[in-house]
Image (tube, grey):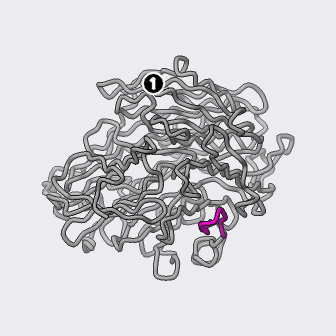
Amino acid sequence: MRRPCPCASSLLVVLAGCGGGRDEASGPASIFAEITARSGVDFVHHVERSGRFPLPEIMGAGCALFDADGDGRLDIYFTDAGRFPGPGAPDRLYLANPDSTWRDATTASGLRDTGYGMGVAVGDVDNDGDLDLYVGNLGADALYLNDGHGVFEDVSSRAGISGSAWTTSVAFLDYDVDGWLDIWVAHYVEYDHDRLCTDASGRPEYANPRELRGVPDTLYHNRGDGSFTDVSVAAGIAGHASNGLGVVVEDFDDDGWPDVFVANDGQANHLWMNQRDGTFREDGLPMGVAVNGHGVAEANMGIAVGDVDGDGDLDLFVTHLTGETNTLWLREDFGFVDASERSGLAGPSLPTTGFGTAMFDLELDGDLDVVIANGRVTRGPAHERANIDPLWNLYAEPNQVFVNLGGGRFVDATSDEGVFGAPVEVSRGLAVGDLDRDGDLDVVITNAMGPARIYENVAQRRGHWLVVDVVDESLHRAVYGAVVRVLAGDRRWRRTVSPQTSYLSSSEIALHFGLGDASRIDAIEVRWPGGARETFDGGPVDRSITLVRGKGRR
């Protein structure tokens, strides 16, 4: 474990004072460059404001980074909203060009979803080698099959995707380890459009979800013939109604079977532990992640998972409402412990409302950093850099960047970095992926009633990298749920093939490892769904590799 730097109080110290090889006289280093204007992406989230302050207006939308047309480049999908009730605005698909720009290909793609868009998930549900889409809406959801060339067909009806509940985040998973991707759908609240809410001053304001009835999540089982069955009752999740916003699939007990964590807004979180018999047991409270360290159920929004302290197991980060700290739970022997205060992530989050978030290695120094998309849900003082409109400025907040100093101690680098926290908007969805294929991860953010933003990672590199794809040739796809450990000297890094995290969003499927000063990999270990293990030879760094099931050593 790398020791933390003794006195890092700014981004300059973080990137230069701890072995970055940077001249301090040169001033603070940038981490991001905003490239939206030259990217070709002109998506703007549309909400037709009614003046009644209906809750869906403030929830924003998601995005997905995936290869839609099979050319090896990351394309971008955005969900959109419109008016509810009433006509929705169409979602948008942008295909990547060879020069790291994108073009709008929505019409040609057949992706014509006009529901009130929320979350989106990516996965190959028919095992034909291309990536399909599940779009979650306020109302009927949609499942789109990909023909392999970026043309999609809506198969929701014949696939058995039904219901009209308010869907938020969605995740693909193989919960029964049968080789077919199933679908976990998080639901929010029973929405009453006629209900009007006010704040303490009597002004119209967006509703407090604690005052609304929650909705149980849905689990769809993939039958392998193009159809799905709702198994929520049989799986044991149907009796737990909560205000779900974020969802992530991970193997929290390391038994080889996927578990599910759901962030619930204003209620206790759910940690669904896979019982390996088609059912789940809710263990949020005994595992320590239902509430924070003070026993309070907070407004849980976005989720990030990773090993922030370098001890080999999974830690859990969840974003929260203004006045509540974002929470970092560190995994210990018998569950999780709230380490928000000592990590440095708590204090800077008190004045903000966090939604989308991700853990990844910004500067490739070997540990996981954190980025957060912020934006209020009730009025506050207008930020000096907010420039949207007189009302919406009252909801805008700067996004944040936290750099890991080692051992799970973080410093807020937003002010020194200067780009990611401006412009100040009402940010919601967040996804990460290597958009320019240079070995580090870039960021896409959606803004409620505003333009999407694309941020290129330009951080000064402090180490090497490795990108790993994990595939099963018999399934013709990436193996969701595979756990990969990269070994180099006395260091090891862990990642899981599970792209749906954050809030309403789906990140790149490939696994990215920052390796610090490791100049060669000793070995790579893979634990496949179900628990089988293989070891693959190491080799050079700063490259992308593909690990094929059955080609390693057992």
Residue at the location (20% across, 56% down)?
462
Q: Residue furthest right?
A: 194
Q: Nearer the viewer, residue 154 or 358?
A: 154
Q: In x, y percent, where is residue 309? A: 36, 71
Q: In x, y percent, where is residue 332? A: 46, 79
Q: Residue furthest bottom?
A: 334
Q: How many marks?
A: 1
Q: Quadrant of residue 289?
A: bottom right
Q: Quadrant of the C terminus?
A: bottom left
Q: Is residue 315 part of the magenta span, yes or no?
A: no
Is the residue 41 above or below the residue 260 in the image? above
Reading the image, the residue beneath label 1 is 149
Is the residue 283 above or below the residue 184 in the image? below
Q: Is residue 11 visible?
A: yes
Q: Residue furthest top?
A: 108
Residue at the location (54% across, 29% down)?
44
SS at circle 1:
loop
In magenta, the rendered stretch is: 270-281
Residue at the location (39% across, 54% down)?
401
Q: Quadrant of the N terminus?
A: bottom left
Q: Quadrant of residue 321?
A: bottom right
**Side of 516 where 134 appears, left or right:** right
Q: In x, y percent, where is residue 96? A: 38, 27
Q: Nearer the viewer, residue 408 or 64?
A: 64
Amino acid type, residue under disc 1 in the picture: His
Is the residue 6 above or below the residue 471 in the image? below
* Other-residue count near label 1 (Cα within 10 Å), few / some / many at <14 / 14–19 / ≥20: some
Q: Quadrant of residue 323?
A: bottom right
Q: Is residue 9 visible?
A: no
Q: In x, y percent, where is residue 20? A: 17, 58
Q: Nearer the viewer, residue 304 or 400?
A: 304
Residue at the location (30% across, 69% down)?
406
